[in-house]
Image (cartoon, helix red, strand yellow):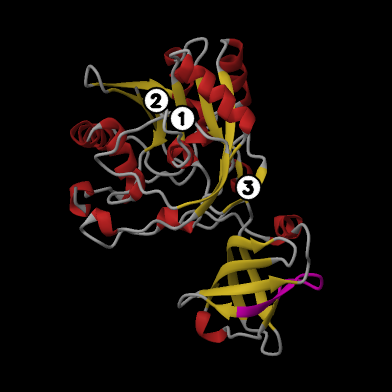
């Protein structure tokens, strides 16, 4: 498949700027791969497709307040520092993006307040820098107070205080993402309780989503595209829950492309999940043989993005493009704060 196969025209008016309230009342497009049917439901109806013994996999990564504004020492020039990934916890070393980059050189210090500053120790890309913060230990607490919610670049507005909660799943636990696992934004505490009461086990995993999720694919030949590496963790307890369901011929519902990539990065020869932690740059596009995922909950994604490619690999190319055509026609809300899809 080629990059241009995933092109479609997304009107700006269909990019959701704010989420639906309550979050589980977004539309849910249900796509049945067997019957090739496409139905419109409400997200809270997702429970109707789950049976006792099934498993719901969720990504517990927590979005950090990744966008910081500081001043360069001596000149007081305003500098934006966007946190990308933690390289060394003990020494508080991070990869970041700086803007304006031409003003930021190795050895410069950027001050955020009277307690927090960082020093530039290396250049990575044109706007990328490696920095060392002066607060070893829990940097997340410091940035939580002064940082800004890293809304995606296509949401053309400034963050509001509500985004701090809205751009976070209700089960987010582990700091580390700079973009939300958006399929999970639709779950409420009440819906998760109902799911558990029905006898569906919840298996939490972690994949810290990086900015690569928004990076455009720049090669027509998809086999030449390289994904950014992202850190993931699958605990022995969650692997056991998933593997028991597979053994019992139950279905594994996976929330989002990030969880899908984590699971498919850690598969045994027998087709079970392996407890694991590390970095993955797995790129899933058609054709692809899914080993673990049997049901996929996802959002409506950007044209030519790696996310729509993964959905196409799972759903089938013709059916996913037909579904997107229907979503455009029926005014579905697209992207992070938009509506959802369940592919069965």
Q: Is residue 174 magenta?
A: no
Residue tagged by mark 2? 295
Of residue 273 and residue 299, the one placed in the foreground of this image is 273
Q: Is residue 116 magenta?
A: yes
Residue tagged by mark 1? 254
Magenta stretch in the rendered image = 111-121
- Mark 3 crowdedness (10 Å alpha carbons): few <14, some 14-19, many ≥20: some
Instruction: Name the mark on residue 273.
Output: none
* C-alpha distance separating marks 1 and 2: 6 Å
| Local secondary structure at mark 3 | helix
Which residue shows up at 40% across the image and 48% down it? Answer: 282
| Local secondary structure at mark 1 | strand
Mark 3 or mark 2: name the one nearer the start of the chain.
3
Q: Quadrant of residue 276?
A: top right
- Residue 54 appears anywhere in the view: yes
Mark 1 or mark 3: name the one nearer the start of the chain.
3
Marks 1 and 2 in Cβ contact (< 8 Å)? yes
x and y percent of residue 308 in the render?
32, 43
* C-alpha distance separating marks 1 and 3: 24 Å
- Residue 154 appears anywhere in the view: no
Q: Quadrant of residue 215?
A: bottom left
Tell us which disc is closer to us: 1 or 3.
1
x and y percent of residue 271 in the render?
42, 28
- Mark 1 crowdedness (10 Å alpha carbons): few <14, some 14-19, many ≥20: many
Outermost residue to the right: 115
**Is the C terminus in the top left, top right, bottom left or bottom right quadrant?**
top left
Of residue 5 and residue 153, the one placed in the foreground of this image is 5
Residue tagged by mark 3? 164
């Amino acid at each position: 498949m080629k990059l241009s196969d995933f092109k479609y025209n997304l009107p700006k008016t269909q990019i959701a700027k704010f989420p639906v309230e309550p979050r589980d009342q977004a539309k849910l497009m249900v796509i049945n791969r067997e019957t090739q049917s496409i139905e419109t439901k409400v997200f809270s109806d997702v429970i109707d497709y789950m049976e006792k013994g099934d498993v719901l996999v969720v990504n517990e990564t927590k979005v950090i307040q990744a966008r910081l504004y500081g001043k360069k020492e001596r000149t007081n020039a305003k500098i934006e520092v966007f946190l990308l990934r933690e390289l060394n916890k003990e020494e508080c070393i991070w990869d970041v993006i700086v803007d304006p980059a031409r003003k930021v050189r190795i050895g410069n210090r950027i001050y955020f307040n009277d307690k927090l500053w960082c020093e530039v120790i290396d250049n990575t890309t044109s706007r990328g820098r490696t920095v060392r913060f002066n607060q070893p230990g829990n940097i997340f607490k410091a940035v939580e107070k002064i940082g800004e919610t890293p809304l995606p670049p296509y949401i053309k507005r400034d963050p509001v205080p509500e985004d701090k909660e809205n751009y976070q799943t209700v089960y987010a636990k582990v700091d580390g993402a700079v973009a939300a696992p958006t399929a999970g934004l639709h779950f409420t505490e009440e819906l998760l309780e109902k799911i558990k009461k029905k006898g569906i086990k919840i298996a939490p995993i972690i994949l810290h989503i990086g900015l690569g999720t928004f990076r455009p694919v720049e090669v027509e030949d998809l086999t030449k595209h390289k994904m950014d590496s992202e850190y993931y963790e699958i605990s022995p307890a969650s692997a056991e829950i998933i593997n028991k369901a597979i053994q019992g011929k139950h279905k594994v519902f996976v929330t989002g492309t990030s969880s899908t990539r984590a699971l498919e990065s850690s598969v045994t020869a027998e087709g079970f999940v392996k407890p694991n932690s590390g970095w993955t740059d797995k790129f899933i596009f058609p054709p692809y043989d899914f080993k673990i995922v049997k049901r996929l909950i996802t959002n409506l994604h950007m044209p030519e993005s790696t996310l729509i490619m993964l959905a196409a690999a799972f759903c089938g190319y013709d059916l996913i493009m037909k579904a997107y055509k229907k979503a455009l026609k029926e005014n579905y809300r697209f992207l992070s704060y938009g509506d959802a899809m369940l592919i069965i």
